[in-house]
Image (spheres, rainbow, N blue to C red):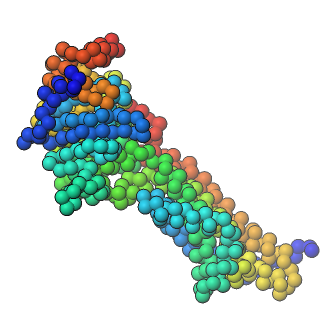
Amino acid sequence: MTEEAREETVETPGEDNANTIVSYKNVKKAFGDTVVLNDLNLNVNQGEKVALIGPSGSGKTTIIRMLMTLEQPTEGTIEVDGEMLWHKEVKGEFVPADEKHLRKVRGSIGMVFQQYNLFPHMTIMRNCTEAPVHVLGVDKNEAKARAQEMLDKVGLGDKVDQYPAQLSGGQQQRVAIARSLVMQPKVMLFDEVTAALDPELVGEVLEVLKDIASEGDTTMMIITHEMEFARDVADHVLFLDNGKIAEQGHPRNVLENPQSERLQSFLGRFIETN
Amino acid sequence: MTWDWEFAFEVFPDIISAIGITIGATVAAYFISLTLGLVLTLLRRSSFKPLSLLIAGVIEFIRMTPPLVQLFFVYFAFDMSPFVTGAIVLGVHYATYVSEVYRSGIEAVPSSQWEASKALNFSRAQTWQKVVLPQAIPPVIPMLGNYLIVLFKETPLLSGIYVLEMLAVAQQIGSDTYRFLEPVTIVGFLFLVLSYPSALFIRYLEKRSGKLPGSAEKGVKT
């Protein structure tokens, strides 16, 4: 066993505890011959804020895309809130999940994308009410009230009648966060949500994320290149390298006292480029 | 043969009285091609491979045979009125072309829109209905409009199975009077009078389609 792997088992005990909401077991993901994730074991607790850092191609996006059911793991299992994500039990055996099962478990997960992915043909308000009304079956007026509340929270309560193209990137990303929040997911995934933004717009989005994080009970998995933000918000930092968790732990330890040379040079590059 | 104005004026009312049949057949066939075209596109994208292959084969087959042959075949094989036969055959024939238009519209919707729909837990049907089609169809409306004109100009084919549209009436006048030039010219003139404004209208739609809400998004970044 390598040193990194031993550290991993110390930090995340294999058995689930009562607080575990997301659990990856021996997950492998390959695209053709290219293995992007190898034997990933990871538990995330209810309410925990996990930051995923690492060079591009290290597999961090794949981790959260599998959770959002956008990619299917090649091997292993993922559990969300006590239910298998990609498998379901039929007569005591686990078989690949069908769309119905996927929709059921997907309901507890929300995701915000790097490119915002708002619906360009809908107003800001409809972007935020369409899913609550048609997926959750919430009453239209109630959905509107809830959307208004979330849009106020991200500071865009006055933009409800505009279209995404009329907003700046930072504003669009804040709408995307509000859109995800109105679905009240148990786990929220953030895929480099500030990476496509002009530098001066990054701050407003990070502020919104900090607000959500400080409110508590939503579990968050955040892929980010903003190290300061990761240190302030995360309870746990994962450093991914070459499809493996190379180092993990409390942000202060991982970010301020990196053990491996890989992480040292990764963080060093950051200080230089920023 | 010299042009006879007097004769032209004499037969003009007879020919124009058939314009209703021409327009009726066009509208009926267009309606069939728009609806069936969308159905074909969606079936062709089915994840059930045998179905999508079957549909692809049927589409190829229909395209590779002439509409006139299809008209005769359906007319003699099934017991339907000429008008109904004509509307169905032209409708189905052009549905295969219209489905290609829908396909281009659908493929232009970025895959990230599908992913966002999944993240919000829309069903597949909801994703089509609320996210993909509303973005796929407006940009192709001008192309769909072009097929209205194409179909309109194809309706004289229906004279082959005795639908009394404008050309059939003109031919009848010709064989009764041995004067074909005037009736056929009038038919051409009437087609021009109807097609040209339609083409202008489609050009107007093309210009306008760039200004639909949200359609500017592709160019805007941060």
Res A92 → quadrant? bottom left
Question: Looking at this view, is A88 or B146 the one in front?
Answer: A88
Q: Is residue A245 above or below residue B145?
A: above
Image position of A159 (left or right of B53): left
Image position of A43 (left or right of A96): left
Point out the image quarter for the N terminus of chain B: bottom right
In this view, the residue farthest toward the right is B1
Q: Residue B128, position in %: x, y? A: 39, 57
The residue located at (22%, 25%) in the rendering is A1
Question: Looking at this view, is B192 or A90 the one in front?
Answer: A90
Q: Residue A195, position in %: x, y? A: 34, 28
The residue located at (51%, 46%) in the rendering is B210
Res A201 → quadrant? top left
In this view, the residue farthest toward the left is A18
Q: Residue A168, position in %: x, y? A: 36, 33
Point out the image quarter for the C terminus of chain B: top left
Q: Is residue A264 visible?
A: yes
In this view, the residue farthest toward the front is A1
In the rendered picture of this protein, how many numbered marks are placed on residues? 0
Q: Residue A143, position in %: x, y? A: 21, 53
The residue located at (79%, 74%) in the rendering is B184
Q: Is residue A240 above or below residue B197?
A: above
Res A53 → quadrant? top left
The residue located at (37%, 38%) in the rendering is A30
Q: Is residue A201 visible?
A: no
